[in-house]
Image (tube, rainbow, N blue to C red):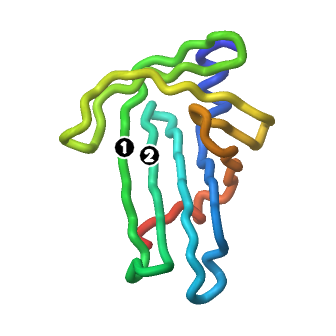
Amino acid sequence: MTPEAAWQQLQGIWVHRVGDRSIAGSSWVESWHWFTPDSRWLWVNLLAGGIIPGIQRNEWITEITDVAIQGEEILLTLGRKSDPQAQPGGVMTVRFRSADRLIIEDGPALMRVTDLALWPDGE
């Protein structure tokens, strides 16, 4: 796979969920990742339940400055970040488990989301 083909396949929204937000009063967390055509990575974490009032939302935007392939791994070089205290740079490793499953670093499997309307805007 070429770096360009890998980036094309990576583009879109990926999510990992723990808990069920449709059950009133339950604890849940969602981690949303959106790789955009303009080489950005948007990462939104939503957390609710327990002693947390309402929904806690954290969001980061990071530029992707380079894409490389190393065996089955996709290496993304990270550029400028929206967090003013975060330093640019570093490499993030991404692997496809299947066409609709993605692993970032050694984290949990993310599922591809095909409906852009599901992106958590203004939760």
Q: Position of residue 101 (x, y in %)?
A: 74, 42
Question: To which quarter of the image does residue 103 belong?
Answer: top right
Q: Which residue is mark 1?
A: 61
Q: Quadrant of the C terminus?
A: bottom left
Q: Residues within 10 Å of mark 2 (few under 14, many from 20)?
A: some
**Figure check: 37 above or below 18:** above
Report how many numbered discs are placed on residues in the image.
Answer: 2
Q: Amino acid at mark 2?
A: Leu
Q: Are marks 2 and 1 in contact (CB under 8 Å)?
A: yes
Q: Position of residue 19 (x, y in %)?
A: 65, 70
- Pick out the residue farthest to the right: 98
Q: Quadrant of residue 105?
A: top right
Residue at image location 52% in from the left, 39% down from the top: 35
Rendered residue at 36%/43% (across/down): 61
As drawn, the residue found furthest toward the front would be: 51
Q: Give the number of the disc on residue 53.
A: none
Q: Give coordinates of residue 116: x percent, y percent.
A: 59, 58
* Image-based side of 33 in relation to 57, left or right: right
Q: Is residue 122 left or right of residue 73?
A: left
Which residue is the extreme one toward the left?
84
Residue visible at 43% across and 36% down? 40
Q: Secondary structure at mark 2?
A: strand
Nearer to me, 35 or 52: 52
Seen in the image, is 69 located left or right of residue 90?
Answer: right
Label 1 secondary element:
strand
| Residue for badge 2 | 42
Q: Residues within 10 Å of mark 1 (few under 14, many from 20)?
A: some
Between marks 2 and 1, how big is the CA–CA gap? Answer: 5 Å
Picture quarter with the N terminus? top right
Disc on the earlier residue, 2 or 1:
2
Query: Which kind of residue does numbered mark 1 sit on?
Result: Ile
x 64%, y 23%: residue: 6
